[in-house]
Image (cartoon, rainbow, N blue to C red):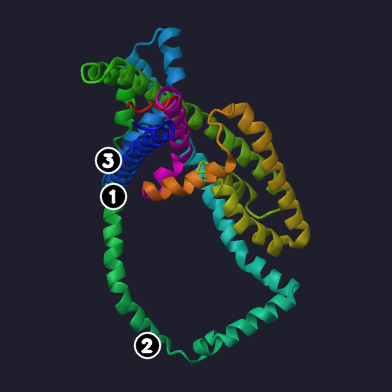
């Protein structure tokens, strides 16, 4: 006969074993998903983009169907034309301006560097000493550039082959992404209840309460994806606008390009902030000195304050409820687990989904640990 303490120990041991098995299964699924995405990325990415776009425009589609009496096919065609027109507008109006800003920025870099060396002679002397100690100055003085060019040409042949292979990859990616409009049209025009179909097909294989829980989790994941991308797109646009206007008023070179670029980089949480700290601060210091650096720092503080205390709470409505440290860890974890940028983009929705899954598991299945019978 087991004592109460022994029963409790056995119960917790059985529970721990079950959790370990579930954890191993989950890790296996994540690893296999990462390998699957690394191999079939060109197949998954277009479908993923089409699904996100379809979810984002779903309210417009419902409005056209219910209020304007459009057929689903006409609604899908109208929205597809709208999305393509918006992309064409960006290509013909925004992209040339961005390229011009980038060209002006690249042209201004030598002048900024010369001014920085002139304003900070101690830094210039330290850099010159570093180059001389490293032997780089003497190396370029003594180098035979004819020999160097020949060696560089010989070494560049494999790189050229790799470049050709990369061009083939770009062509394959372009061909794959060309089917995004087709996916988008069918997803919008045909109102598929995928979650309902999955639940219906699973009803004959699983108990009703398991089917209900699976349906609940899938609906929660869909809601998280929709809320996150709709809200995040608006948040990063406002965040980028604040940075762009602030940089422009501070006199930073290529302010609009840098502001909106850093804003949209924050689609991956904190990426725009990290890049801004590494790029914009040194640029501000070398271009305008300590005063411009102070102004740019104030702009960053204002943008971060607005994003953290106004934009995200008001627009995202704290839907995910994740701590900032959890968000930062999830970006690195899912980026490694899913082999690249897709994991980083989906880091917050996936983490929020697993939080919902854990709460459901704890509430319905781990609420009471069964006692071991004699």
Q: Is residue 364 above or below residue 125?
A: above
Q: Left of 129 or right of it: where is 20?
A: left
Residue 193, position in %: x, y?
32, 17
Q: Which residue is mark 2?
A: 147
What distance separates the C-alpha of mark 2 from that of mark 3?
46 Å
Helix, strand or loop at disc 2?
A: helix
Residue 364 in the magenta stretch? The answer is yes
Question: Which quarter of the figure has residue 294?
Answer: bottom right
Q: Which residue is mark 3?
A: 43
Say whether residue 266 is visible.
Answer: no
Lower position in the chain sequence, tag 2 or tag 3: 3
Residue 45, position in %: x, y?
34, 40
Question: 39 or 23: nearer the eye?
Answer: 23
What distance separates the C-alpha of mark 3 from that of mark 1?
14 Å
Residue 326 in the magenta stretch? The answer is no
Question: 368 or 286: nearer the eye?
Answer: 368
Q: Is residue 243 above or below residue 57?
A: below
Q: Which quadrant is home to the C terminus? A: top left
Give the residue displayed 36% in from the left and 50% down from the top.
339
Q: Bounds of the magenta span?
A: 339-367
Q: Left of 117 or right of it: where is 267?
A: left
Residue 171 bears which disc, if any? Answer: 1
Lower position in the chain sequence, tag 2 or tag 1: 2
């Amino acid at each position: 006969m087991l004592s109460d303490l022994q029963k409790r120990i056995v119960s917790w041991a059985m529970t721990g074993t079950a959790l370990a098995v579930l954890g191993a299964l989950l890790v296996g699924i994540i690893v296999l998903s990462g390998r699957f995405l690394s191999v079939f990325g060109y197949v998954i990415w277009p479908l993923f983009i089409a699904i996100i776009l379809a979810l984002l425009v779903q309210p417009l589609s419902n409005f056209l169907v219910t209020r304007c009496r459009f057929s689903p096919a006409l609604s899908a065609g109208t929205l597809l034309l709208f999305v393509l027109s918006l992309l064409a507008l960006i290509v013909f109006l925004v992209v040339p301006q961005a390229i011009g800003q980038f060209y002006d920025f690249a042209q201004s870099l030598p002048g900024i560097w010369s001014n920085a060396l002139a304003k900070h002679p101690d830094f210039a002397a330290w850099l010159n000493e570093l180059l001389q100690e490293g032997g780089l100055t003497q190396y370029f003085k003594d180098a035979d550039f004819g020999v160097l060019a020949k060696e560089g040409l010989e070494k560049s042949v494999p790189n050229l082959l790799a470049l050709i292979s990369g061009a083939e990859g770009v062509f394959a990616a372009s061909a794959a992404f060309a089917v995004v409009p087709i996916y988008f049209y069918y997803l919008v025009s045909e109102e598929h209840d995928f979650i309902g179909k999955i639940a219906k097909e699973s009803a004959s294989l699983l108990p009703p309460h398991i089917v209900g829980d699976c349906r609940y989790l899938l609906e929660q994941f869909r809601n998280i994806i929709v809320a996150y991308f709709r809200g995040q797109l608006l948040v990063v646009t406002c965040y980028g606008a604040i940075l762009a206007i602030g940089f422009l008023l501070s006199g930073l070179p290529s302010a609009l390009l840098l502001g909106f670029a850093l804003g949209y980089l924050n689609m991956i949480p904190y990426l725009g902030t990290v890049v801004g700290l590494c790029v914009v601060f040194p640029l501000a210091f070398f271009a305008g000195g300590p005063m411009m650096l102070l102004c740019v720092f104030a702009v960053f503080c204002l943008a971060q304050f607005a994003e953290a205390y106004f934009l995200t709470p008001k627009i995202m409505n704290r839907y995910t409820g994740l701590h900032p440290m959890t968000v930062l860890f999830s970006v690195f974890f899912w980026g490694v687990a899913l082999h690249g940028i897709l994991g980083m983009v989906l880091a917050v929705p996936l983490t929020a989904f697993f939080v919902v899954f854990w709460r459901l598991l704890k509430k319905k299945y781990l609420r009471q640990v069964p006692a071991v019978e004699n």
